[in-house]
Image (cartoon, helix red, strand yellow):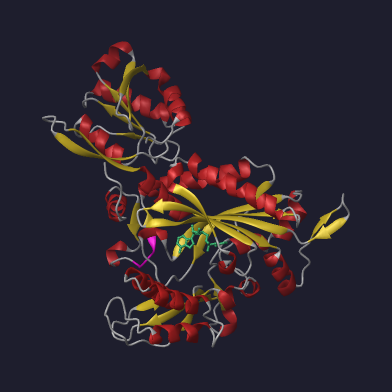
Amino acid sequence: MSALQNLDKIVSLAKARGFIFPSSDIYGGLASVYDYAPLGVELKRRINTAWWTAMTQKHDNIVGIDAAILMHPTVWKASGHVDSFNDPMIDDKQSKMRYRADHLIEGHIAKLREKGKDARADEVQRLLDTAGTRHGMAKDLHEIILAEEIRSPDSGAFDWTEVRQFNLMFSTQFGAVANDENIVYLRPETAQGIFVNFLNVVNTSRVQVPFGIAQIGKAFRNEVVARQFVFRMREFEQMEMQYFVKPGSDEEAYEAWKAKRLAWHTGIGIKAANLRFMPHPPDKLAHYAKAAVDIQYRYPIGWQEIEGIHNRTDFDLSQHQKFSGKKLEYVDAGAQERYVPYVIETSVGLDRTVLMVLCDAYHEEEVPGEKDGSAEVRTVLRLHPKLAPITAGVFPLIKKPELVELARKIEADLSDDHRVQYDEKGSIGKRYRRLDEAGTPFCITVDFDSLDDGSATLRDRDTMTQIRIPVERLADAIREGIRTWTPPD
Ligand code: GAP
């Protein structure tokens, strides 16, 4: 019935049903930091497992690691994050609000176009594109804001500070003595933990180029414009894989990983029509990249990046070689050659994937109500069954000991392989609705006939169809339902 217009319904469902809570909720929350609640943690774990399986189990040349969040501070000098992981920010002195200076200018350009002032918009766009080439990035952006008399979006004031570069890394003190030499950073990406372990993995894991190292872990960015629920967070998780290839074979590997990664997203049930590639134009490439493409998902807030695929060349390994003084080469004994491998990176946000999965699965439809048959709205999460936090609900029709006993036995049998929820409270219709909202694909009801014929009712979440099935066949039917599921239109 309703396509989502914004994230509001997802945010409310996530809180009400226990997928995601604001962090430190009883203290009013902490901006852009979230906790995973009982259903959310199960969903996140299943996505995590789906990615890990696709990477390490399905590729015999990809191994995993789990590097520490805290790393030697020189790592971030070598990677370029100390010098270039910055956003240009400007403050409205009256409202004290802080803005990305380039975003303010982009908003201004969009407004000029809406008013039909295309020539002016083109000129401001040109100034923005060449910012940094006249008096440095901060000064150039400041000059555009002043010359165009761009006003604060919130207060309407024209009372700006200078533009300042704001580093997005969180820093903390290492050890007991607080001084500048003891500063370490919370990693802003997991990738560097892989690069600095390249040599250790090569020397211990019998891997041969091409091979990959996969990792799932927390990353931290002091995002200034952090909003939109778990889309942009200050503490989040990344699932990253660095694929080390011989220079010259990088372009082929890059194309192959693009296709594989898109297929992974549809494989977890995302509708193909809601996914697309968005290549980075050559003049917007990150300093380390030879080519880059985003996989974008059509969120209710518009098409946005869910995953980045980058040809990082030998930039990172060469930088770490330079800063550490250690040779980070691959020795191909057969071909009698040595080289610093090129790297194809696939990097997907776990929290953004959770959000994508929830948005794609969210569905409302009108169904006949329980009492008088008048229409009511059913909210259902049509999650891929392999991701569903609870795979099956098991209900006794009413709370009679013999029905409870059989339902509890079914619950115990199925829980060897699945997360199952027993529920005996409320009408069957209400029990279905609760689990529809939790995305539970199968519900099993035991009634008095079950005691005679050994069958139960198996109800499908998406179609709401019900079939009678022998109790001993339930596990097979569920396994088959998970294997053959495709997203409903
Ligand atoms: N190692 C490459 C790298 O970190 P990125 O494009 O900055 O590249 C990769 O990040 C992915 O991490 C993004 O596609 C996104 O899914 C996720 N991500 C980045 N910043 C995020 C944030 N503040 N909150 C949630 N997810 C984020």
Quarter of the rendering containing residue 321: bottom right
Image coordinates for residue 48, horizontal then vertical, percent: 50, 48
What is the quadrant of the C terminus in the image?
A: top left
Question: In the image, 5: left or right of 485?
Answer: left
Q: Position of residue 184 (x, y in %)?
A: 56, 74
Does the magenta-highlighted stretch encompass residue 338?
Answer: no
**Magenta span: chief secondary structure:** loop
Which is more toward the observer, 407 or 157?
157
Q: Residue at x 74, y 49 (%)?
A: 207
Find residue 84 and report its horizontal and vertical position in percent.
57, 76
Residues drawn in magenta: 30-34
Quarter of the image for residue 230 reads bottom left
| Residue 434, image quadrant | top left
Name the foreground residue: 192 vs 471. 192
Instruction: Locate residue 473 relative to residue 263 in the image: left or right.
Output: left
- Left or right position of 308 against 472: right
Is 31 in the magenta? yes
Q: Residue at x 71, y 63 (%)?
A: 314
Visible residue check, residue 228: yes
Residue ID at (63%, 75%):
77
Of the pair 135 and 403, the residue shown nearer to us:
135
Please say if 81 is above or below 218: below
